[in-house]
Image (tube, coloured by chain):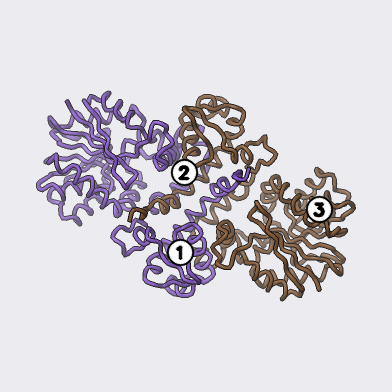
Chain colours: A brown, B purple
Amino acid sequence: MADISPDLFMDAVLAYQQTAAIKAALELDLFSEIGKGNGTSESLARTTGAAVRGIRILCDYLTARGHLEKQGDQYRLTQSTAAFLDRRSPSFMGSVVEYLAAPEMIDLFLDDPAAFVRNGGSIGLANNAPNHPIWVKFARAMGPSRGPLATKIASELADLSPRKVLDVAAGHGMFGIAIARTVAGAQVTAVDWEAVLSVARENADAAGVSGRYHTLGGSAFETEWGSGFDLVLLANFLHQLDRDGCVALLRKARASLAPGGRGVAIEFLLNEDRVTPRFSAMFAFQMLGSTPQGEAYTAREFEDIGREAGFASVIAKPLPPTPQSLILFEQA
Amino acid sequence: MADISPDLFMDAVLAYQQTAAIKAALELDLFSEIGKGNGTSESLARTTGAAVRGIRILCDYLTARGHLEKQGDQYRLTQSTAAFLDRRSPSFMGSVVEYLAAPEMIDLFLDDPAAFVRNGGSIGLANNAPNHPIWVKFARAMGPSRGPLATKIASELADLSPRKVLDVAAGHGMFGIAIARTVAGAQVTAVDWEAVLSVARENADAAGVSGRYHTLGGSAFETEWGSGFDLVLLANFLHQLDRDGCVALLRKARASLAPGGRGVAIEFLLNEDRVTPRFSAMFAFQMLGSTPQGEAYTAREFEDIGREAGFASVIAKPLPPTPQSLILFEQA
């Protein structure tokens, strides 16, 4: 009986306060200040311009939740916090809060949580609507920390020596751009809403590949993609669609491939139990609340989807330590 | 290096979705339905009127987060979920979401999280304003699950045979009511805003002690309490005040006690490190975001506060398995 406790429930009820604490800390750039050696509430209050009392209670909370360490009255970054939340770190990923915990995302989940469960999908954010401004926010917030994963994927794909690559629903464009950087001479065409493509073009400029970077504005479903591609990238896009949508998009991908070309998805794969890995089950719920028909799929489901779309084989490769997998859709 | 991971950060960024999931499940009364033996997405969709797809993804999420168990396509309650979230359980506490995750509480934390840290206290909810409707919500939401703790505390205090008890900022009134039930003949007077006292009176009626239950409407600080009390209860009230407010309120309590009478607080005590127990550190942050000056205190701080208010000794007693402690302020 000793392990019967309301703690897990209470933690979930109050979980929104975790989001608030991490957003407050990032806005105050608290982690960078601690990383610079400002270790006490007093010195942090001075450098962030916040009340000592507010900083003290926030830092104690962040310590209690494992984001900081505390010795006496000195706060220190954990190794993970130093790697990902200190703005001076090359692997800084704090900007993802600007999308993942954006006010409009939070509202989608907390305005009426039972409504999207009843409906079997979000009734809020029209993420299929042309040019929804959330996708510009997505591109700006998620792009900066995608570099390492994009480079890893590009090196996985470099063996295929793709010359002509299509990046569908490219967003920040980081995945296609990494291929352009890794594979000399590769030409990359990004498809997305025009406003989003301007972010991708900035990133291509910054990466020095804009001479081989092309864009096609419009809906992934309605745009004429062209043909002869060695790779059609579907990076974090299929999970926004239902099964039929995935099949339709993969058919379109197959039709635009050169002989021997491949469709390549980046996805959060669920195991057959659909509750592990935990991040994928969490991700499916994120899609339930924020898209009309999206969710997470299993490797077997993607295999079925790929075959229905006319591909001969489907190969899933985990991308540790990330929670994502690469899925290759291959022609006969 | 293997333990350097963004997982804890990502979990915090997305934590608001935990709150959404638990609110959705409670609103759909999902846990009671699973408790009745509706174990599949299909049967749960039928009984809750929700889409199968919504139920499946929600239940998988709740399983991934430890609130449910899953075998094949059958969901089951964990022991803790059965005890606290199945509406048919005598220890059901699901109604706390109506206050702790109420839209106005969530807004206080998520509208501008850095603002209350900068300010060193909430600038939103005017919880000291007369008759703020949030306190009626508090009383209705928190009362139903306070029974077991209130009974435990009443039995701790029964040895003192209090005849005249004052319950300050009584809210739902459950703590004073439990004393009235446990100590034959004890007269209890509750102080709170009039609208809140109507909830306390309903609870006193339901407990069969309304003949010995009296009310005094108004601010705890401004109301004339009277004198000759054997106990002045300050249940979950001091944490809403700053140190000076605690001293002032305890002085007022001492002045209204009979000789030998005691002040009795119920509180979330922090250890000297201020980051353990975790729930108390979390609670301090909850007070930072939702009150102008409240937080959590250590036993030593309450001892200092009590002495400054003129009490001779202060004794803290943990109330396991709850995260709360009983604090007795004793006269010479």
Q: Quadrant of the C terminus of chain A?
A: bottom right
* Tag 1 subunit: B
Q: Residue at x 31, y 53 (%)?
A: B140
- In screen coordinates, is B218 left or right of B125? left
* Tag 2 subunit: B
Marks 3 and 2 belong to one chain: no
Count neighbours of disc 2 (C-alpha within 10 A) and say few if under 14, some if 14 to 19, many if 20 or more: many
What kind of residue is marked 3? Ile
- In screen coordinates, is A113 left or right of B29? right
Count neighbours of disc 3 (C-alpha within 10 A) and say few if under 14, some if 14 to 19, many if 20 or more: many
Disc 2 vs disc 1: which is toward the camera? 1
Q: Residue at x 23, y 39 (%)?
A: B233
Looking at the picture, how far across and down is residue B269, in whole percent? 35, 37
Q: Looking at the rendering, which quadrant does residue B309 occupy?
A: top left
Q: Which residue is mark 1?
A: B69
Q: Secondary structure at mark 2?
A: helix
* Tag 3 subunit: A
Looking at the picture, how far across and down is residue B225, in whole percent? 19, 35
Question: In 3D space, how far apart are the residues under numbered discs 2 and 1 (Cα atoms)?
Answer: 33 Å
Q: Which residue is mark 2?
A: B108
Q: Which residue is mark 3?
A: A179
Q: Residue at x 65, y 43 (%)?
A: A93
Count neighbours of disc 1 (C-alpha within 10 A) and say few if under 14, some if 14 to 19, many if 20 or more: some
Label located before the other in sequence (2 or 1): 1
Q: Quadrant of the N terminus of chain A?
A: bottom left
The answer to whether residue A124 of the structure is visible from this angle is: no
Looking at the picture, how far across and down is residue A30, in whole percent? 57, 33
What kind of residue is marked 2? Leu
Return the residue nearer the eye: B143 or B198: B143
Numbered label attached to residue B257: none
Q: Are marks 3 and 1 in contact (CB under 8 Å)?
A: no
